[in-house]
Image (cartoon, grey):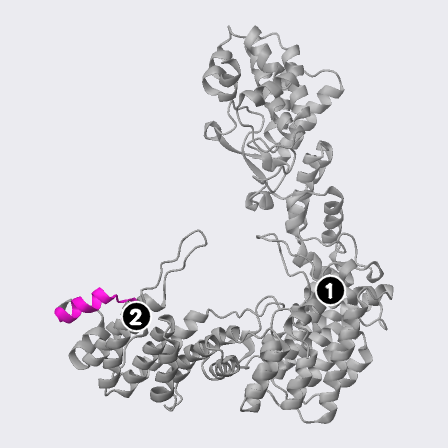
Amino acid sequence: MKILKVLMLLLISTIFCLPSKACGGWEEYETYFRLFKPKYMIADQEFASITFSDEPWSNISVWYPQQNEYDENLKLWKAYFPVSFDDEELKQFIYKLSEDDLKKAKNNPSQASNKVLKWVIANDTQIFDYLLFAKECEQHCNPRFVYYWEEAEEKDLKVYNQIIEKGMAMFETCSNSFLKERFGFQLVKLMRHGEKYDECLAFWNTKLAKNKKSIMYYWTLDHIAGVQIIKGLAAEGRKNFIEVFLNSPGKRFSSYCSVKIDTDEEWHELLNACDTDKQKESMYFMRASQLGSVALADLDSLYQINPKSEYLPILICREINKIESIYLQNKEAENVFYQLYFNKSNINQKLSDYLQKFNRFLSKCIDEKQIKNIDFWRISYLYTNFLKQDFDGVREQITLLSKNMPEAFKNQLDIIENLLLITDNSKSPIQRQNEMKATWNVEVKDFAYFFMSHSSNKLPYPLNVDERMYDLRTELDTEKLKALVDLADNQEELTWFSSYILKNHYSTNSEYLKEMLGTSYLADNENDLAVDVLSELSEEYKASSQTFYLSANPFNYLINDRDTQLLKNVGYGKLKLAQTLYSINNAIKEGRATAMDYYLLGNAQYNTSYFGYAWNAKAYYWSGGYYTGSFDCTDAYQNFLKAAKMSDDKEMKAKCYYLAAKANQNKYLTDNRENLYWKSDLKEKDMQNRGYRDEFLKLKEEYKDTEFYERIIEECKYFQFYVN
């Protein structure tokens, strides 16, 4: 018998080599393709949610366990009251009213604002007394979480004894069976937390064990099971946790986690202690669904006990998803299916062997005809055939499916039929791409794109590159944008699937793409090409675009880059920017450029860089964590220096040297890959020694008598720090 630890080692070391996943919000989509959908295959299974979350390797339920307990308890209270109450009023009465609230209302009923509380005070004071007792128990049975650096308070067992004595008296005198059962629950909980284990078990055996097996019975049994394990009755305790798991949805998650088995001996003891096959089934289900389990052996054992077990479909779905998570990775080099199909290379033989064994198990169960819901098994089997690339076997199994199977199963089958078309090498790539239109299921889109991106499938560039519009807007690529513009202008020549990718991954709006291309040309300093493509945009498009117009004229300057409120909002278009830059560069090439030309060019280059207020002239994305867009200020720096040297105006020279100093400071940041400049003696000394403060030195020594100097000594903290 393989215990869980052995299974986990086998899993990690030999079969499933899991890749690490990015943390935070960087993952755009799952790291594998999940094409077998539990939402279709086990939609109505009562126990399914315990083993399914967004990550199939997790055995952590998507439930919020405490909420399930609240809901279960709320139903019991609603059924008890002879009158109907609003759910929120009832929740407030049970969970939110404090001990003080209850006592105040008892002493002065007019202070009670809760409708349930008012009714209880007027009609059933036994409920009131029980609730007060329950609130007192909570203080001792639900202690505050203690952090590792804190010292836990020592329990005062005398207090527990006093509360237990009081509760015992209330239990004995209570004539209301609903409340008596709850008093019993509170007492068992108190005895457990008060470490009165023998008394707890004796109380259970003599007063509660023979009660009707209600929800509250199983809530109480949940605590008894824990006490039994503490007292060395481990098999009995675990068996009772299984009973709770089976019968109390509100306690299902906690009882599932409580059945902990570490050795083969403990496993066999529990198996021998089980009274029913259902308990044994649950044992195998719990172990098979544990984190890290390789479930095939437990699936087979479960099948031998009960071929119609409701646990089997859950575990089969989970196991298929686990196989998918390795077999269908979204990286070509790691995708077993992809490598087998295109390169005839098996990059994970152990996993392929396991898939083969799993496939044979499904086939055996189908052939023996003892199972429940044959269509579930056939669809599971034919999907594993698909993973094995036994496509003829898939088609054969499809013909055996019932015509009147549930709609959810048909949804899964539709996914598989789409996959068959995508991978059908008897048809040309162009034929497949066009036929997809008739059968298209959006749930296969990511896999279809991944699979069809292989060079043999002839998707046009850049539709065969693993990118989306988000990637392209984050980092502009001129060649890709040129290709996309061409595709958008010639959509009638594309296959249906190519058109689909163009529309869903990028855009079919030619003008939108041309604006991006023009922006990319601006970033490349290809101003003539930017003029050409931006001139093609219609006035209607430019008026509706949120990115064509800049908020201010990029040829202006700021002493402090953060003072953007000083700029006049003029809506300066990218076409006008490209035309002006083209004109200035032409003047430079022809040798007729003035100091003002170099000054304006430097301003535009600086302001449209990462550091400037018009950064969005050459980029669509700006990050505070790393440099994006155009961030090299070298050209701006050189042009400010040229303007300063050519100018005869001392004020103009001072301005140009200051602007060159700003560009030089940013060069220091980008050259040293720093995101921020912190003013410090050490940093200033480094900048001075390496020539990044030459312009500040020049201003200090040669331009003290200018009005501009007076402005910057007041407004620029960096310059103040340098001078002082």
- The residue to which callout 2 is attached is 160
Residue 606 visible from this viewpoint: yes
Residue sitting nearer the eye, 671 or 289? 289
Q: Position of residue 549 (x, y in %)?
A: 57, 38
**Quadrant in the picture for the N terminus:** bottom right
Q: Position of residue 371 (x, y in %)?
A: 66, 91
252 relative to 685, above or below? below
Q: Main secondary structure of the magenta part?
A: helix
Residue sitting nearer the eye, 188 or 451? 188
Q: Position of residue 14 (x, y in %)?
A: 75, 66
568 relative to 294, above or below? above
Quick check: 330 left or right of 651? right
Check residue 161 in the rendering and tell me which mark sits there, or answer none. Answer: none
Residue sitting nearer the eye, 266 or 696? 266
Q: Position of residue 578 (x, y in %)?
A: 66, 32
Seen at 43% across and 77% down, the residue is: 227
Determine the image quadrant of residue 99: bottom left
**Which amino acid, by three-letter code, is at mark 2?**
Tyr
Check residue 13 in the rendering and tell me which mark sits there, or answer none. Answer: 1
Span shown in magenta? 93-109
392 relative to 335, above or below? below
Mark 2 residue element: helix
Task: Please tell me how many numbered marks the rendered image carries.
Answer: 2
Determine the image quadrant of residue 86: bottom left
